[in-house]
Amino acid sequence: MTVVGWLQIAVILAVVLLAAAPLGAYMARVFAGERTFLSPLFRPIERGLYAVAGVDPSREQSALGYTVAMLVFNAAGFALLYALLRLQGLLPLNPLGFAGLSPDLAFNTAVSFVTNTNWQSYGGETTMSFLSQMAGLTVQNFLSAATGIALAVALVRAFARSGASGVGNFFVDMTRAVLYVLLPLAVVTALIQVAMGVPQTLDASATVTTLEGAKQTIALGPVASQIAIKQLGTNGGGFFNANAAHPFENPTALSNALEIWQMLVVSAALVFAFGRLVADRRQARALLASIGLILIVGIGITYWAEAAGTPMLHAAGIDPAGGNMEGKEVRFGLAGSALFATVTTGLSDGGVNAMHGSFTPIGGLVPMFMIQLGEILPGGVGSGLYGLLVMAIIAVFVAGLMVGRTPEYLGKKIEAKEVKMAMLAILILPAAILGFSAVATVLPAALSGLGNAGPHGLSEILYAYSSAAGNNGSAFGGLSANSPWWNATLGIAMMLGRFAYIVPMMAIAGSLAGKTRLTASSGTFPTHGLLFVGLLTGVILIVGGLQFFPALALGPIAEQVQMLAGKTF
Amino acid sequence: MSSKTETASSRIASPELIGRAARDAFAKLNPAHLMRNPVIFVTEIVALLVTVIFIRDLIAGLPLRFNGQIAAWLWFTVLFANFAEAIAEGRGRAQADTLRKARTDTVAKRLRDPADHAHFDRVSALDLKIGDLVYVEAGDLIPGDGEITSGIASVNEAAITGESAPVIRESGGDRSAVTGGTTVISDWIVVRITASPGSSFLDRMIALVEGAERQKTPNEIALSILLVGMTLIFLITVVALAGLGRYASADVPVPILVALLVTLIPTTIGGLLSAIGIAGMDRLIRHNVLAMSGRAVEAAGDVDTLLLDKTGTITFGNRMATEIIPVPGVSEEEAARLAVEASLADETAEGRSILALARERYGIAVAEQAEAGTNFIPFSAATRLSGADVGDRQIRKGAIDAVRRFVAGASGRPAPEIPAFNAAVERIARSGGTPLGLAEGGRIIGVIHLKDVVKPDIKERFAELRRMGIRTVMVTGDNPITAASIASEAGVDDFIAEATPQDKLSYIRNEQRQGRLVAMCGDGTNDAPALAQADVGVAMQSGTQAAREAGNMVDLDSDPTKLIEIVGIGKQLLMTRGALTTFSIANDVAKYFAIIPALFIAAIPELGVLNVMGLHSPQSAILSAVIFNALIIIALIPLALRGVQYRAQEAGSVLARNLLVYGLGGILVPFVGIKLVDLAIVALGLA
């Protein structure tokens, strides 16, 4: 580890915070339906869209109505994307003449992009037509991100309102998330990325003559427009197979910094928006502190593990000061890779600029554990915030009784209904991750896809299901996942991780919205101080993460201790 | 808390009680009963599973020692949890037995004609119906709960209140309710029965202290759901481990998977949860308060607003003389002496306080007996004066206008306007006191300041409540000026002056609309609607039947100050639950470090680095975790029954302290505990 490395990390995180605060304030205004500086531009478009779609923007939906609208909307998105992927061979904008996708791959990919996971069982530049990339995947990048934001806003409203029956209108929140938040950010940052050297063209490829005089075909395409929203919407699905490690997706250390900023900024801003919408910004600061604490420790461990390298590398005569550069891009270095890896997994983005499977076992454990903690650090756009609030509900309930009152969070009493739904929600991750992994470890059809034996193979399995169920989408590397077993089960895991979580979460929103919001007194459990930060962090680690400890002990931890003992597989 | 309570709870249980609870613990193994407690039910099922494996090994002639010990300790875990519940119930049952003695089958004298007390049928109390009129005279047990329709009697209620001094019960007014099982000591009463046999106050009380009617309270239900959820999560973890272990060529035998499951699921809080609830009710009963439901006890902890009657709670019941202000030209001594003469025969508390003031402040020697020739004039509602005629001197005290009228009548001309006197009267009235005029013949002597004296320590108690986030509201029939003055002296947050029952009701409704929980106490029939509306309504045992029916708690001591203690007990109950839940969940960290290396060390020897406690062997590690998990239930029973330490502090500092003790403590204690158990079982050669 170097001072420069840590400085890079600190500067990027600081710039995120600096931008997230005003962006959060702006988003709070957008979702409260107030006027913003972009209203003159977008208000007419917004009205036109409602008129065309027949949506009455003033009509509020109940939590149930909101959820049903969201499910129907996402089901339609899935059906369209599935059809597009299957039929891409017959459709235009297919300069390289790719055929339609197989049913299991089309299912997996459609689920993947609808659920904001962007797990990719395919290589983009060798599978997808431009129409699929632009009208299919990029559109879903916007819509799945906007869905997450809308749901989070609905839950926050449930906290902010008192004795209310409605939590907002799904279609209005969706439209505003795309129009006022994601689109302007995507356009501006895509242009910056173009300036940094990311291609944006409808040409299929460029043929160049190399210095040696050989002919080389270089894949091109509308890259910048897709990767801007891929990062902003914490989607993570790359244009190219190598994702953000590819020089056209992420050409320089500066573009790497921009991509990390893009990943974090909307999710972090949502926490700020939450503080404003519930009219108590201290609450947002407490959540951010908890996120920051775990994230920075995670970054530190990864950075340390990678910088320490492995005894095998040292024995091979490689300078120990270089650390473990295997699977990393020299232009990003150790710090840039460790930061990207931790953030992309703390966030449910899933874009990668280095191969996590090539990290040291502990360096690879951190990203996996980040996903298993529930993608709440600060998590996917929207999904991170509502996941974090569900965790906060559990933390408040467990320890809040210790002040001698029925626990309250943000003035809402946490009672049987909320606890039941919160427990249902947090059951999803262990059930999907450990359940599928346990089956996969004994099933030959699953094991044949592994790239490595021993604990590293187990890590590949665990990481794949964690990534799918956590709607992260990053791959550990090594696993050949384009087979019916993996496509199907990972698809199911993605759906469970997204929708089976959302339904109980929205039930909480419905129950909370109807409750009277109480004013805090000196007898109320304080949820803004350092004490709560510590408590929430402890609950996230113990309730959210501890159940994965036995599995991790057999995977990355076993690999690390064996590696230190000089054992390889 | 009263000293009585401390001595009662300092001993958790007598040896007989422990013996009986131990027997009950086995009876509670019945799965139909354990279903109510999912965490312990799961433990019982897996204990059964390991027992079956043990028997299989026995038949197959495989090594038995380890599985046998695991099975035994799993059963102990279930038994210890049952024991905790049984001992909590046992403590209540001992009290129920005492109560039951009062419910002997009494003979009732049922009247045929309400007006005719001479003719009645002797019937069994069990045959009485609601609405029957019974005649009860000195020496009789009152056959059932009811309302006095005529007569007055002194009644010994020791059977239910434990207080042997008799109380007066009479028809009409707020002291008309009688309770079955109490004894009439003198005179007679006619009682209209208001409860059918089997549902009387005493019956309900017995059922409550025995825990027979115990239902899970809302918060307990929510907590149970959390525990079920945690159990499911760990069930998934452990079942998945079977598959993952096979992949790593570290097949884990079922008994060890079971051991891991049982140590991870929250057996500690699961085992103690019902004991905590029962003990909470019990603690109330030890304070002589009966809660009609566990929900009410829980609500007491959540109370945001306390409605307190001024009289008896905030002030001593009676007004007291605090100063005597003479008019110009009259010395203080003379005024005090005349005040004494006017009050010598005055047996009211106010009168006696005048004598006490004169003696202590002005050094007047108060004679035991009045001089000969003194003729006392008792207070009458018509003149609103009292006093004495000593010889030809007429000394009177009373309301200011009445005294002026008396002076005018005695002197034959209008009473003089004395500015100093008028100023003193106004000052007293403005400060919330009552001015009492004093006159001798046609001469105004001065004014006596009668004051509602606020109890000395009440202000600190209200400050304490405020720190806990509870608002106090004083309810009084006084006018707003008097009320405001007393309110500021006592340090309450708000007051309701000239309060009518309707005012109280609407105040409560208004608070509840803002999401606040309200507690109040009351005794009169006109308090009943407010008592029913309040989230915690404490009726006084001395009150009317209507009030007792409307409230959800009854204070057998009829002490309105008790409300503050009730809130404390409710809070302590919730705190105890929270503390043990946090402790139980925090324990898991250490258990992982004990069991995980033990599970896989054979397949992956390098995982030995996770054995941070340096436990002797895989077998000893697993056994010590299971044994610690079982023993901690027993170790925490006293805490569950007594409740965690409760101090009136603001939530932040309470949380900080409890989080440190039960959260951080919960993480650290098992590391030490498991290590000690490991050393012990190695020393004993058990593993």
Image: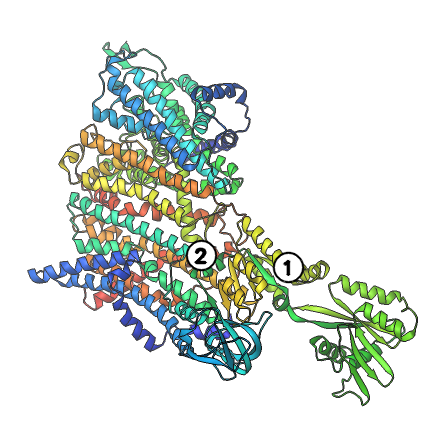
The residue drawn where x is 39% and y is 41% is A507
- Expressed as whole percent of the image width and height from the top left, the position of residue B13 reads 37, 74
Which secondary structure lies at badge 1?
A: loop
Alpha carbon separation for disc pair 2 and 1: 38 Å
Circle 2 or circle 1, nearest the eye: 1
Q: Would you say B687 lies left or right of B109 here? A: left
Give the residue at mark 1: B500
Q: Is A487 above or below relative to B313?
A: above
- Expressed as whole percent of the image width and height from the top left, the position of residue A509 reads 43, 40
Chain label for disc 1: B
Does residue A545 appear in this view? yes
Does residue A293 appear in this view? no
Extreme residue in the left direction:
B60
- Expressed as whole percent of the image width and height from the top left, the position of residue A77 reads 33, 25
Chain label for disc 2: A
Q: Would you say B376 lies left or right of A481 here? A: right
Extreme residue in the right direction:
B413
Q: Would you say A222 lies left or right of A458 here? A: right
For the residue pair A553 and A376, the one nearer the viewer reads as A376
Q: Is B293 above or below relative to B605?
A: below
The residue drawn where x is 24% and y is 35% is A313
Identify which amino acid the numbered label 1 is placed on.
Answer: Thr
Q: Is B633 above or below relative to A287?
A: below
For the residue pair A13 and B133, the one nearer the viewer reads as B133
Identify which amino acid the numbered label 2 is placed on.
Answer: Met
The residue drawn where x is 42% and y is 37% is A63
Q: State whether discs 2 and 1 lie on one chain.
A: no
Which secondary structure lies at badge 2?
A: helix
Give the residue at mark 2: A402
Label 1 packing within 10 angstroms: few (<14), some (14-19), many (20+): some
- Expressed as whole percent of the image width and height from the top left, the position of residue B322 reads 74, 72
**Quick check: marks 2 and 1 in contact, CB under 8 Å?**
no
